[in-house]
Image (cartoon, grey):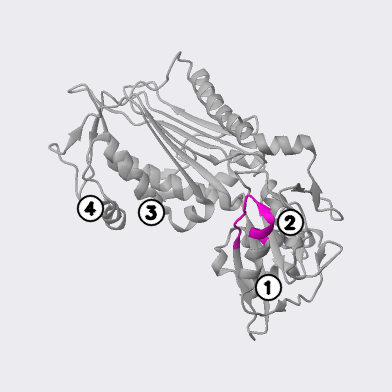
Amino acid sequence: MIIGEKREELLLVLKKINFYYMLYTKKIEEITYQDVVDFCNEQIRENISLDYKEMIDTGLAKTVAAMANTVGGLIIIGVEDQDSKPKLPVKGIEIKEHLIEQINNIILGNITPPVFPETQICISDDGQKALIVLRILQSNITPHAIKNNAKVYIRTNTSNEPEELASVDRVLWLVNKRAKSLELKDSFFETADLRLKKIVGILGNPICFGDFILSASPLYPFNVLVDYKELTGSLLQKIKCDYSHYDFPRNLNREAFKPIQNGAYSLIFREDDDGYISYEEFNHFGFIYHREDIDRYNKNDESHNSYLVYLLCELHVFLQSIEKFYSIASYWGIIEIKIIMNNIGKMNFIDLPAPKGMYKFDELRVVPTENSLIFKREVTYKELQEKEIDILIDIFTELSWSLGFSHVNGNMIKELLEKGF
């Protein structure tokens, strides 16, 4: 009996978690009136990233600015709160013309620099009432001030004072947040590189040819996104993606992930003719790092080869996987995607095959003029969720061009992805 009760309690907790994540990560235009009602029925308390408002008024500007200054958040309008929880039944607000314009006028007229939240007007089935969902990104241009650029607020977890006037130190921190976050993000890269070199036990770069790095991170990492204890397997299983014999996380079924400070890593290293290395690292700030040897050494002619199709598939599953990761982490902000290729100046890169075609010995091979390449993209979670193929095409077209394959274009990539290899 006790086991059954515990199971029911666990199911209720999981249900509440699912509702919580849904409004944060579901496509904003797909959120319905019933979705919001179901969310409110779960009686989730207001917190640093969640606020209920009974009506539209000028106080909305302070909450929006405070959330943008802190970690972003969700505002639901049309819900009266009682002891920081939604008062049931949810009443909604009367439907009027120009609701979005009314909200935009309050936000744009009172916040400097302006904040642009995602907004969805959810109308009831009878067409009489509306619930409004505002989703605010953590800003990269803080601080956002209100009241004629005079006051800066931050969001707190205190129910009786959810917006707190920022101290001078906190304002200075907001001003410098970009630099501090960049330093933190750079430290992730440096630590991952040093860790790999130490584990492999080679001085200098452990990958002699074809050093291929994929990484993703919140643009300005600030707060913890996931429980680091889940990064040795359970969470990684949930984000695993497969395509045409390629997968990511690539090491998941080949080598156990081991604990490190705030995360986990995995290394595959073969000291044979290939000298193959595949290294992956995840941390609880949302930093994802994959580094791999893409050199396919041919002993017969001592050539170092790599295939464009390999890079395309790796990037494809990587983008799909990180979208799942940030969904689970309930992060909907700006993501920096970075691709680095080192030690490629003496390699042959082999052209994409025809769809359903076979590789041939006379395929186009190009030796890049550059020895190193770096590609960066900044995308929102929403863009990654809705336009992954477009992002893939954009990055991969530039990568192919830089390697010397000027004929590679979006139509060719789409055809290969649709028809297979």
Secondary structure at badge 2 equals helix
Identify which amino acid the numbered label 2 is placed on: Thr
Identify which amino acid the numbered label 3 is placed on: Asp
Secondary structure at badge 1 equals strand
| Residue 304 visible to an observer of this rendering | yes
Farthest front residue in view: 148
Q: Which residue is mark 4?
A: 355
Q: Which residue is mark 2?
A: 63
Q: Earlier in the sequence, mark 4 or mark 1?
A: 1
Q: Are marks 2 and 3 in contact (CB under 8 Å)?
A: no
Q: Earlier in the sequence, mark 3 or mark 1?
A: 1
Q: Earlier in the sequence, mark 2 or mark 3?
A: 2
Distance from the alpha carbon under mark 1 to that under mark 2: 17 Å
Q: Position of residue 233 (x, y in %)?
A: 58, 42
Identify which amino acid the numbered label 1 is placed on: Leu
Distance from the alpha carbon under mark 4 to that under mark 3: 19 Å
Q: Is 398 placed left or right of 154 in the picture?
A: left
Measuring 80% from the left and 46% from the top, which residue is drawn there?
165
Which one is in front in this view, the residue at disc 2 or the one at disc 4? 2
Q: Which residue is mark 3?
A: 390
Which one is in front in this view, the residue at disc 2 or the one at disc 3? 2
Q: Earlier in the sequence, mark 1 or mark 2?
A: 2
Q: Which residue is mark 1?
A: 131
Magenta residues (range) = 107-118
120 relative to 305, above or below? below
